[in-house]
Amino acid sequence: MQFQKNIIEVKNLNFSYEKQKVLEDINFTIEKNDFLTIIGPNGGGKSTLLKLILGINKLQNGFIKVFGKNHLEEIQNIGYVPQNTNVNLKFPITVLEVVMMGQNSFIKRMFGYKKDEKQKALEVLKKVSMEDFANNRISNLSGGQRQRVLIARALFSNPKILLLDEPTSNIDINGCEQVYLTLQELNKKIPIIVVSHDISVILKYASKAFYINKKMTQHDLSKMKDEFKSIDSHVCEIELLEMLGKCRC
Ligand SMILES: Nc1ncnc2c1ncn2[C@@H]1O[C@H](COP(=O)(O)OP(=O)(O)OP(=O)(O)O)[C@@H](O)[C@H]1O
C-alpha cells in the first residue's frame, strides 16, 4: 500500500447555512500522529467542520480528502463521538451493550451478538481502561467513565481516525484528564481530532490547535508544550483563547 502522508486534506472550504456564512477559506492537512484540538468561540463553526468531514453536512465547494480519496468513500474509517450522545440513560443497558452498538448492523442488534463480538467489545473497553465495568449499567457510571465507554463504542468498528465533539462537557477536571489521557494513549496508533472548550487541559495533550471563528488560524503546539505541561493551576482561558485567535503563527 502506498504511504499516505496526509490522512485528511481539506482545501478551499467555504460553508453557509442558508445565507449565513459559517466557514470561510478553510485549508489544512492532518497527518498520522496528529492530536488536533479545534477551539474557538460558541458558534464559530467547529461542529460544522466536523459534520462536513463526516458527510453529515453536504460540501458546497472545495474538497475534503481522506486517505487520498473523496471523504465520503472513507466514512467507515472515521470513528465519531458526537456532542450529544443518543444513549438513553433511563434504558437498562450495560456498558458492553453500548459498546456493541458501535456496529451499524440493525439486524445484529435485533438478533443478538456473537461471542467474538463480545470479546471484541471487551478488548476496546480495555483500551479505554473500562473493562472492569463491562457488566455495569451505563446509567451507573460517572460522566468521565461514560465518556470513555462512548469512545470505546466509536473504536468498535476499528476506525483509522477518531473525531470527538466536546467529549468532556459537564465533566469535572479529573474526569477530563482521564478522558484526555485515554485519547493520548489511542493517539499512539491513530490521529485524534477533538473539538473542545477545555482550553488549558487540551493544550497539554494536543500537538496542534486550530482556532476557528469562521476563518481558521493554525497553531503548532509543540513549541509551547513544556509551558502547558507545567500548568497545574488556574489559567485564564478567555485570554488564552483571545491570544490564539489573534496569533498568526
Ligand atoms: N443546522 C443548522 N442550520 C442553521 N444554522 C446552523 C445549523 N447548525 C449550526 N448553525 C449555525 O452555524 C453557526 C456555527 O455553528 P456550529 O455548531 O458549527 O458552532 P460551534 O463552533 O460548534 O459552536 P459551539 O461551541 O457553541 O458548539 C452558528 O451560528 C449556528 O447557529
Image: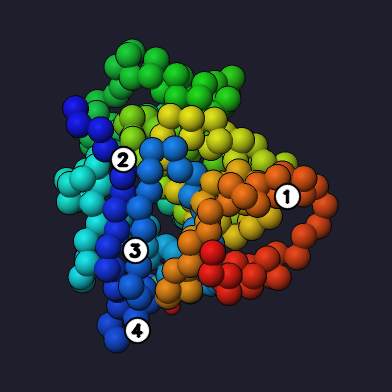
Q: Are marks 1 and 3 in contact (CB under 8 Å)?
A: no
Which quarter of the image is occupied by the C terminus? bottom right
Horizontal side, residue 110 vs residue 168: left or right? left
Give me the C-alpha separation between circle 1 and circle 4.
38 Å
User: Which tag, 4 or 2, sits closer to the chain's start?
Assistant: 2
The residue under label 1 is 227
The residue under label 3 is 27
What mark, if any, has residue 5 been given in the picture?
2
What mark, if any, has residue 137 been given in the picture?
none
Give me the C-alpha separation between circle 4 and circle 3.
20 Å
Give me the C-alpha separation between circle 2 and circle 1.
29 Å
What mark, if any, has residue 20 been given in the picture?
4
User: Which tag, 2 or 1, sits closer to the chain's start?
Assistant: 2
Q: Nearer the viewer, mark 4 or mark 2?
A: 2
**Which quadrant of the figure shows ligand 1?**
bottom left
Badge 3 amino acid: Asn
Looking at the rendering, which quadrant does residue 158 occupy?
top left
For the view shown, which residue lies furthest in the right direction? 233
How crowded pointer 4 is (Cα within 10 Å; few <14, some 14-19, many 20+) is rated as few
Badge 1 amino acid: Glu
